[in-house]
Image (cartoon, rainbow, N blue to C red):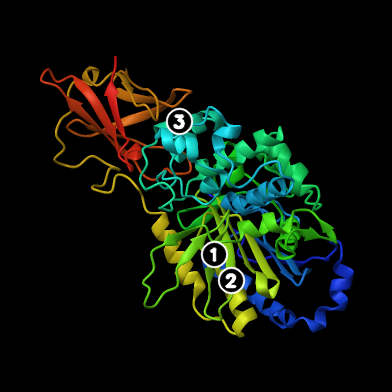
Amino acid sequence: MAITRRSAIVSSALALAAPGLAQARSRAASDPIEKHLPDLDRIVAETMKKTGVPGMSVAVVSRDRIVYLKGFGVRRAGRPEPVDADTVFALASLSKPLATTVVAGLVGDKVVSWDDKIVRHLPDFAMSDPWITRDITLRDMFCHRSGLPDHGGDLLEDIGYGRDEVLHRLRYVKPKGDFRAAYAYTNFGFTAAAIATAKAAGRSWEDLSAERLYRPLGMTSTSSRYADLAARGNRAFGHVRRNGAWVVGEQRDPDALSPAGGASSSARDMAAWLRLQLARGRFEGREVVKDFALDETHRPQIATEPADPTDAAPTFYGLGWNMGYNEHPLVHLGHSGAFALGAATCVNILPSRGLGIVALSNSSPVGAPEAVCRSFLDLATSGKIDRDWLALFGAAFAKMAEPTYGRDADYSTSPADAAPAGALSDYVGTYSNDLYGAIAITQNVNTLHALIGPKNTPYGMRHFSGDIFTFQPRGENAYGPSPVRFTMDVRNKSTSMRIDYFNETGQGLFIRTA
């Protein structure tokens, strides 16, 4: 039964009880940002009404003061518990700039340098090219210039491999771009660099993050372990859209890529982190991270999108940060986080203005946090909202949500003119692939099953036409059914199968071995 979303938006302005806020209130009238804060209430309410997103939490920092801290809506659709400033959300890829802040702390402590070779700290790590294996650095992975294909390795997590095995199997991922010359966003490349840093410090990543960043900033609701999020009483549940309504779906456990997407936090805690960013590593008068180390995370490392030089400025990626330059011009740093299974987050900062905003939500991405952040920055810098940011970001996320496989036909049902399959026993066997491991095709009476991943998870298969069958993938990158295309020999016995779900980068061929 679908859960009905609450139609009313619950808004609660919370007492600003973080350290230093008494002084902040006394100086509020002198900050020009203050006059736009009532507009932010309206922006959030309108964005939630248009998208139906169940809950959001927003914080604004200006000149080292938390000037806005509010929760909106509900933690779980159909339930009354409101979101407040201490509600904990999955951050998804907003974990990345948090992670490089941790690493910057270690760089300042001289435990590592940005240009340490990964194999110095993870001797067993390897890429497909021995030269790249020897030379690739923390910096290369943190700015996504490794040559790995976009999101390379993510499907390994989806089919059940843990962090160590995914990192091991990156050696089997074929490069798509040139090393240090092409940008491609990779969660597990980023994770490899963070784990190498943790090894250098002699700690687990999860403990290191808490010790080096969360505790010094008093971020008591922040963790890099999914179990901590799952145990929170004041927690936002991830929602997906089904039949036009937001409902609680499968809750993603992102521990395998914790540095790149597994942190969780509240708006209040993230406001403390924003203060650290804007104060170049200082918090409440204390140096937490060396300024030179944190500054490096804010510097462009590689261009992210080719831009028309006649009418568009290029965009860049730093170390865990997207960055660009607006028309004023102002340096603009930001990052979004998005889980198709129910998380959408955004942070934007203007360092020269001492201004930052973070928005957290509990739905799959539809552009809501990004629209809130960019609309407010428009008000703060030009006094008006320059464009319909929700339409822009909504369209971008809709495009990102399009299937990456099975796009040549409707695989949800067999066509009327479907060719018959061969004997099911002719497809039964074990098929091998270096990257994804072995898949066993088994027969149960009149049905085939694919046993996929390290736990041999069974996936039921349906006949589509001829020697093509389908199965429904699961997890973060699952869309509709994926074709499984068998190749048969002269005896009508299968010799291989190509699975579209695994074939976006051309590595979806499985050779029969038994």
| Mark drawn on residue 169 | 3
Quarter of the image for residue 486 reads top left
- 371 and 232: which is toward the camera: 371
Marks 1 and 3: in contact by CB < 8 Å?
no
Quarter placement of the C terminus: top left
| Residue farthest along the top direction in this orientation | 514
Q: Nearer the viewer, mark 2 or mark 3?
A: 2
| Mark drawn on residue 323 | 1
Residue depicted at 58% across the width and 31% down the height: 122
Q: Amino acid at mark 2?
A: Val
Marks 1 and 2: in contact by CB < 8 Å?
yes
- SS state under label 1: strand
| Mark drawn on residue 331 | 2
- SS state under label 2: strand
Calculate the distance from the C-alpha at mark 2 to the C-alpha at mark 1.
7 Å
Q: Amino acid at mark 1?
A: Met
